[in-house]
Amino acid sequence: MPGILSKANNFLGIGVKHTSFNNSKIVILSVPLEKTVSYGKGTAKGPREILKASHFVEFYDEELGKELCFSKGICTLKPLDFENQRIETALQKIYKTVKFLINENKFVVTLGGEHSLSISPIKAYLEAYTNLSVLQIDAHSDLRDTYENSKHSHACVMARVAELTKNIVQVGIRAQSKEEAEFVKKNKINTFYARDICTKKFRKDWQKKAVSKLKKNVYITFDLDGFDPSLLPATGTPEPGGLFWNETMSLLKLVGKEKNIVGFDVVELAPSKYHPASNFVAAKLVYKILNYAFM
């Protein structure tokens, strides 16, 4: 297991009393993996910048009226190292680390890095929990069988997940290939397209409809390009027409209220000096999901 980051570098900048491994229910795992990015690069720096920005996120959640970081404890591990490793080896390392943490009864938050990494924690959680759905918030379906001669591309991650489970709910999709569209229809993947959300196809209760498709236990994989680029532009492929903050928080809160969030990842932040606020939005998102998971 990686070592533990100090207060100067950990999530939220909290002291040792609430960040030791033994005293923390929550573990932050930084995964600076970037091996198959095809457009905007820089996701390897995402975990570090999320942690830095988190020092400016309030401990107190004004919506839920609590300081989760002190009641549950949050241990931030040192980043995994993937130098000179093939992506297959890197993914196996992530999987083994998350599996170990789950066996230690920890709630694991994985910070990326490119989206390809998500197959590893998802696989570990599928082995640990029955009756589990994967909630994917994303601009892209990521259901290509291969992309740029790789089955482990960020564009293929949900195809790899679908080999393990078809219990997938996609939200915010607004860019896909013909192959992916056909896959969604053939396999009856529950997909809530951004355009349908925007045009009120599901009326005002689209969040409720999405949650109704989820099993009892839920793993969330959150690609930050699911957000509209006006909210978070610092991501690899900022597709227009995305989700906004309040509607997304309403969805996540409902998931936390009606289901059991068992773990999650936040991926595809590509930090930019021109858009530093994106780092803060990502850090705030991580803490909000945690608060909803432990309501």
Image (cartoon, rainbow, N blue to C red):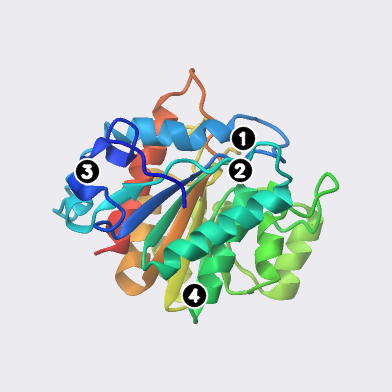
**Which kind of residue does numbered mark 4 sit on?**
Ala
Q: Which comes sooner in the sequence, label 4 or label 3?
A: 3
- Whether tag 4 and tag 1 are in contact, CB under 8 A, the answer is no
Task: Answer with mark 2 or mark 4, whichever residue precedes in sequence.
Answer: 2
Q: Which residue is mark 2?
A: 114
Residue under pointer 3: 16
Residue 76 lies in quadrant: top left
Amino acid type shown at disc 3: Val
Q: N-terminal of the two: label 4 or label 1?
A: 4
Q: Residues within 10 Å of mark 3 (few under 14, many from 20)?
A: some
Q: CA distance from mark 3 to mark 2?
A: 30 Å
**Residue that mark 4 sits on:** 128
Q: Amino acid at mark 1?
A: Gly
Q: List x then y, in percent, for residue 111.
A: 48, 46
Q: Give how far across and how far down residue 219 sits, in percent.
A: 47, 65
Label 1 sits on a secondary structure element that is: loop
- Give above or below for 257 relative to 39: below
Q: CA distance from mark 4 to mark 3?
A: 29 Å
